[in-house]
Amino acid sequence: MKKTFPIQVPDKVTERLIESIKGEVRKYVKRERRKEIPEGFDQWDFDCKVGPDEASAQSMSSKEIFPAIDALAKTAGTQVYIEILARPGKRFPTPIIPTAAATQDGVTPSATV
């Protein structure tokens, strides 16, 4: 999705416009995640850009989109450009970090049998 949304429209409440923009972004992401993932991949990753226009849009993670929209609305911007492109990705396992309780006796959990 590459789209420019107006933030300030005469006779419309700005907060409602922002909520409708967020709803459209959520709907797009849900639709993309329902698509079949290519073989050899685990999930969909999203390349996102948000800014007042296409030329000044900054790359960010998908979790940072909504705060960026709110920030642009507070700076009295008239529009917001949002670019979200789905690409297949792989999940990486999170490293296991031993907790302090498990290593109190000096033995790591993986060394015990």
Image (cartoon, rainbow, N blue to C red):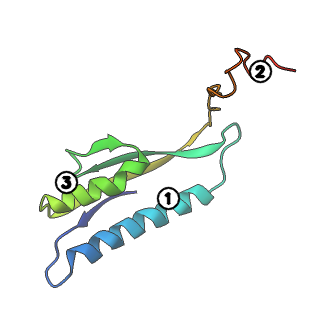
Q: Which residue is mark 2?
A: 110
Labelled disc at residue 29: 1
Direction from residue 64 to residue 44 in the image, left or right = right
Q: Quadrant of residue 108?
A: top right
Indicate which disc, 3 or 2, sits on the residue closer to the N terminus: 3
| Three-letter amino acid code at the position of disc 1 | Val
**Which of 41 and 94 lies nearest the eye of the viewer?**
94
Residue 63: x %, y % from top left: 42, 50
Disc 2 on helix, strand or loop? loop
> Around disc 3, counting alpha carbons within 10 Å, would you say few (fewer than 14), some (14 to 19), or many (20 or more)?
many
Q: Quadrant of residue 13?
A: bottom left
User: Is 48 drawn above or below residue 106 in the view shown?
Assistant: below
Q: Are marks 3 and 2 in contact (CB under 8 Å)?
A: no
Disc 1 on helix, strand or loop? helix
Q: Which residue is mark 3?
A: 52
Q: For marks 3 and 2, give the one nearer the viewer.
A: 2
Q: Quadrant of the C terminus?
A: top right
Q: Residue at x 65, y 48 (%)?
A: 37
User: Is 92 drawn above or below residue 72 in the view shown?
Assistant: above
Q: Quadrant of residue 95?
A: top right
